[in-house]
Image (spheres, helix red, strand yellow):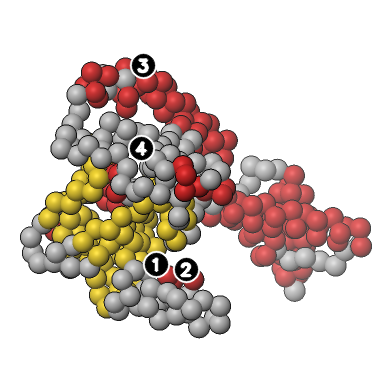
Amino acid sequence: MALVHKLLNGTYILSKCLKPSVASCPFLSTSFADYCSRSLQKPVATPGKASTQRNSAEGLQGDHQREVALDITSPEEKPEVSFDKAIKDEIKEHFWRLKDEIVNHWIGPEGRPLQEVIMEQARVVWQFRGKEDLDKWIVTSDKTIGGRSEVFLKMGKNNQSALLYGTLSSAAPQDGEKSQSGYCAMISRIPRGAFDRKKSYDWSQFNTLYLRVRGDGRPWMVNIREDTDIIQKNNQMYSYFMFTRGGPYWQEVKIPFSKFFFSNQGRIRDAQFQLLLDKISSIGFTLADKVDGPFFLEIDFIGVFADPAHTEEFAYENSPVLNPRLFR
């Protein structure tokens, strides 16, 4: 019994000596602090001393939790994200793009010598040789208004063309508002410059749209939009038909710009206006022939060229410029 009494007294004295030193000394490890706080006996003490010991234990536990949290949030698992750095990098990139645009402007249109541009007879504007070429286009269908048509765009065989395919459905949406449906479209993205400025294509030295396509015999509507900031002209575009032959052979389609007719919100207007070729923002292809079923259109490239045999400037006489008496 005397031996047990001495052992208990020694344990009590050791705990009284070690606990304050652990709480005040940061050089001791957390495992040693846990060992002391768990293995040593805690005799009954006064309320003041008990509160001091409780605070010391809570402080050790908090330090232990902070170290565990630091181990969990390692740089490999949660990398640091700096929004300031991202914004600076984005601004720096736009300034570099602006510098390239200024340098190219001094050299000539699109960074080419002026003499080379003037002597140019043909130009390939879009071609499809990789995924980055597909990113310049968007596809849409009547699903945006509740229809059932589907359209997809992917690279063709050997990555030498773009394949537009899907299923056309003329079933009207069951919303009680729309009575017509059934269209699929492929539209080019508006070109952007530095600081997200809108740019346009200048085709003023060309007179014909030139395409190399392969289809399934369906007629497509080719739509061209002008670059404008006027809200009332957002739904205006110039259109013409492209008839595909079907079969395994490619066909070259040539459409003079003078044949494109003016329309607004899908309706051909009585007053026809000539297409401004120096302010072209986008081009698109629309299928809406009311024939339900699968379709496909394969496109090799889209370009423009100057046809010396075509001298017509405008094909429609109901124009305020050509026949002003009709619009008095």
Q: Distance between the residues labelled 1 and 2?
A: 6 Å
Q: Are marks 1 and 2 in contact (CB under 8 Å)?
A: yes
Q: Where is residue 136 in the image (x, y as percent from the top left)?
A: 34, 48
Tell me the tag on residue 106: 3
Q: Distance between the residues labelled 2 and 3?
A: 44 Å
Residue occupying the point 70% across, 55% down: 62
Residue toward you, 123 or 13: 123
Disc assigned to residue 141: 1
**Label 2 vs 3, first from the N-terminus:** 3
Is residue 281 visible in the rendered image? The answer is no
Q: Is mark 4 on a helix, strand or loop?
A: loop
Label 1: few (<14), some or many (≥20) within 10 Å?
many
Q: Earlier in the sequence, mark 3 or mark 1?
A: 3
In space, the residues marked 1 and 4 are separated at their CA atoms by 27 Å
SS for dot 3: helix
Question: Gap in Å between the C-alphas at discs 4 and 2?
Answer: 30 Å
The residue under label 4 is 277
